[in-house]
Image: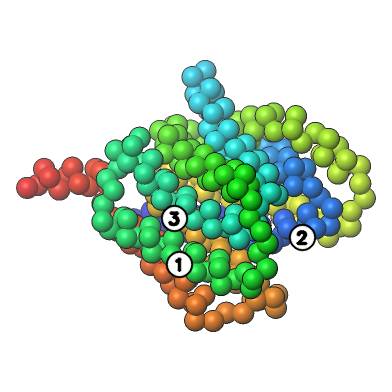
Amino acid sequence: MNANIVKAHLGLLAAGSMWGLMAPVGKLAMDSGISNLSLAAMRMVGAAICFWIASLFAPKEKVSSRDFMLLFFAALLSIVFNQGIFIVGLSLTSPVDASIITTSLPVTTMILAALFLKEPVTVTKVTGVLMGTVGALILILSNQGGSGGTGNSLGNILCLIAQTSFACYLTIFKGLISRYNIFTLMKWMFTYASICFIPFSFNDLTYTIHQSFPVKVWLEVGYVVLFGTFIAYIFMLFGQKTLRPTIVSMYNYVQPIVGASVSVLIGIGTFGWAKASASLLIFAGVYVVTKSKSRNQIIEDKKKV
C-alpha cells in the first residue's frame, strides 16, 4: 500500500470522525434555537466562503463551461439533496430510523459503481459491506436505549433519497473529481449549493441571524461549518480522488462509532461487548472491501492467465 493510499484512508477516517462529532454538536446548537434549515444554510454558505478564501492560495485552474454544468449537478447530489433533504427527513422521522437508513450508503454505492463504473461486485466486496452494515446497525441500535422516537414513512423516504443522491455523486462524478484540485471543486460546488438552498431557508436564516445566542451556540455552529464541513470535505475529496467509490462510502460507518464514543466520554452512554464487537465488525468490513479487486485488477489478472 503506497503513501497516497494510506493518506487517503487517513483522510476519510478523519472526515468520518468529524461528521460523527458534528451530529451531537449540531444537535446541541439546534436544541438552543438554531433551526435545522438555518444551520444547513450557514453550513453551505460558510463553507463556500472558506473554500473561496482557501482557493486564493491554491493553484489557479480554468474550468470548462461543460464542467461548470457538471459541478452544478454534483453540488445538487452531494450537498443540496444530501444535506438539505436529509435534514428535512430527520425532522419528520426518528433519529433511530434516520441512522439505520444511513447504513444503506455503501450498499447503494456498490450497486451504482457496478452500473456506472463497471466495478465488479465480488464476494469479498459484498462480504465487507455486509460486515460493516451489521456492525453499524448493532452500534446504532445498542446506543439508543429505547428513546429513539417514532419513525415516519415520508421522513424515512427523504432520508433514503439523501443517501442515494450522495451514492450517485460518488459514482457518477468520479471523472470530474479527478480533473481539478480540491479547492476549485469545492468553492464552486458550495457556491451552487448555497444559491439553490438559500431561497428555501431564507426566512429561517434571517430570523436566526437577528436572534441573540450565547457564544457557546455560535462556537457549535462554527464547528459545524469549519470542521464538520470545510475541513471534512477536504479530507473526503482527497480520499475520493484516490480510492474507489465503495471504499469511500464504507467510511460512513465511522460516524456511529464516533457518536457512541462521544456519548461514553460525556457520561450519557456506556461501552460494552456489543459496541466493541460492532466497532470491530465495521473496521474489519472496511478492510475486507479494500482487499477486494477493482475492475482494472481483474482485467490485469486475466491478461496474466
Reading the image, the residue beneath label 1 is 135
Rendered residue at 73%/58% (across/down): 27
Reading the image, the residue beneath label 3 is 250
Please determine whether, in this image, residue 156 is positioned above or below residue 53. Answer: below
Reading the image, the residue beneath label 2 is 28
Give the residue type at disc 3.
Met
Rendered residue at 86%/37% (across/down): 206
Report the label total.
3
Sequence-wise, the earlier of marks 1 and 3 is: 1
Provide the secondary structure element on which disc 1 rests: helix
State the image coordinates of residue 148 (x, y, percent, origin top left): 65, 64
State the image coordinates of residue 9 (x, y, percent, origin top left): 44, 57
Q: Distance between the residues labelled 1 and 3?
A: 12 Å
Tell me, yes or no, if residue 96 can be seen here: yes
Q: Distance between the residues labelled 2 and 3?
A: 27 Å
Give the residue type at disc 2.
Leu
